[in-house]
Amino acid sequence: MPNSLTESISLILSLDKDLIDITLLTLRITLSSLTLSIIIGLPIGTLLGLSRHIPARGFIMAFLYTGMGLPPVVVGLVVFILLSRSGPMGHLEWLFSPNAMILAQTIIALPIIVGLTMASTGSTHPSLPQQVTSLGATKLQTAITILSESKYGLLAAIAATYGRIVAEVGAVLLVGGNIETKTRVLTTAIVLETRKGAFGFALGLGLILLTITFVANIILLRFGNWNNDQR
Amino acid sequence: MINDNNQLLYNINNLHQIYNGRTILNINHLSIYKQEILAIVGPNGAGKSTLLRILNFLEAAHNGQIYFDGESIEKTPSIHTIRKVAMMFQNPQLLNKSVRSNIEYGLKLRGKRSNELVLQETLKNVGLNQYAQNKVSSLSGGELQRVAIARTLILNTKALLLDEPTSNLDPYNTDLIEQLIRTHHKLHKSTIVLVTHNLHQARRLAHRCALLLDGNLIEISSTKDFFEKPNDKRVSEFIHGKIIY
């Protein structure tokens, strides 16, 4: 174990090319999925959070909360079937490509970001939208104000979504195939290296995974000015 | 006479509001003049806040005709019309920002830059000039209420709707807010509709008073007549605390 740790640290410090490639691909796929999830999920979550009287709201919430626990391998399997040559999206030829991985991760991430955004915007005072409107806000301005008021909850939603995406292994292994230089990301590489007995390299990958998650959270916290702006 | 030509800001006929099959408001006619201060009193659940929300176009009436400043109001009026009215809620919710940002908020929504002199004057009037950069979370209840009224007054809207602006305030803060309302009215001649449980306050501030009971407008008359020689027996009973709900 100490040897493996030393080996992993020296690998990171030597800026091993394979390590850098895997890290960059991980970042690319994670950030793409996160961006897509935010673009799609934030407005839906806000709408659900603010529309307290929409029909079947309880059912939608139950559906979303179930989605938060969606098994990644099941998502991977469904995306695999959709993208396979005979599947309805086979013509895209995305299987075993980063696009397939982004698609799978976005599907996994969406219920999390929608659900947490809905909870966050919905927890503002029920009369806040009306009060904001009474001061002259348009519907868009009201939504933006509510989002701004739910800033901490939204940052937590983004952090949770990022964490789920970056640590995901089952779905990306299925639809990406863990192909070297093409679809190998940190999590799938850790699985492979562990199976090979290359614990040093696997640990190095794990350390990088933890580091980029930590850095991402620091950036999020700074963005939210969390240190000196708490309620 | 309220203004030079007794011009109406609101002209309301056959107003009905129904929630879940229950009639909340049933007003045959209500005129609100430009530049007047109208106090609406009545027990809890009389429909006062609902009426204010309708006057603020926050909710559409079940039926009835509403004319605002000569314009017939449809279900959703234009943002231009909406911005002619501002309302201070009974429990104002401030934004988790500084005192200054909260006061400037409505102006920013309108794409206006706040005049620094006006802003400083407003802050001074509400006694919060030293706390301009403070987060509202650090303020007391009375200070929060003052920020809430300041952010409404600074908009200089044609109509100002105040829903129990001094509820739960001590006499000092109550007096301060009443002075703000008086000064604002004197300077800007806005129409002010004030919902209050404080009959003394209604008497001190309003040109006219109205009693709402179970959604019905029982009487609307000059403040003097309302308190000294009301036409309806129920007004007298309400003023003397004899109506029990």
Image (cartoon, grey):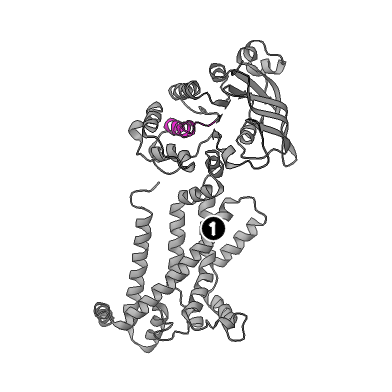
Q: How many marks?
A: 1
Q: The disc labelled 1 sits on which kind of residue?
A: Pro
Q: Quadrant of the C terminus of chain B?
A: top right
Q: Is residue A112 above or below residue B76?
A: below
Question: Dot 1, how many residues are within 10 Å of its Cα: few (below 14), some (14-19), or many (20+)?
Answer: some
**Magenta-drawn stretch contains B156:** yes
Query: In the rendered image, is residue B214 in sight?
Result: no
Q: Is residue A231 left or right of residue A115?
A: left
Q: Is residue B184 above or below residue B56?
A: above
Residue beneath label 1, please? A43
User: Residue B102 versus residue B229: which sits nearer the camera?
Assistant: B102
- Residue drawn where x is 72% and y is 26% of the image: B29
User: Residue A95 versus residue B84: which sits nearer the camera?
Assistant: B84
Q: Is residue A211 left or right of residue A80?
A: left
Give the residue at the far bottom of this rendering: A196
**SS for tag 1?**
helix
- Which quarter of the figure has residue B244? top right
Q: Which residues are magenta?
A: B141-157
Characterize the magenta stretch by its predominant secondary structure: helix
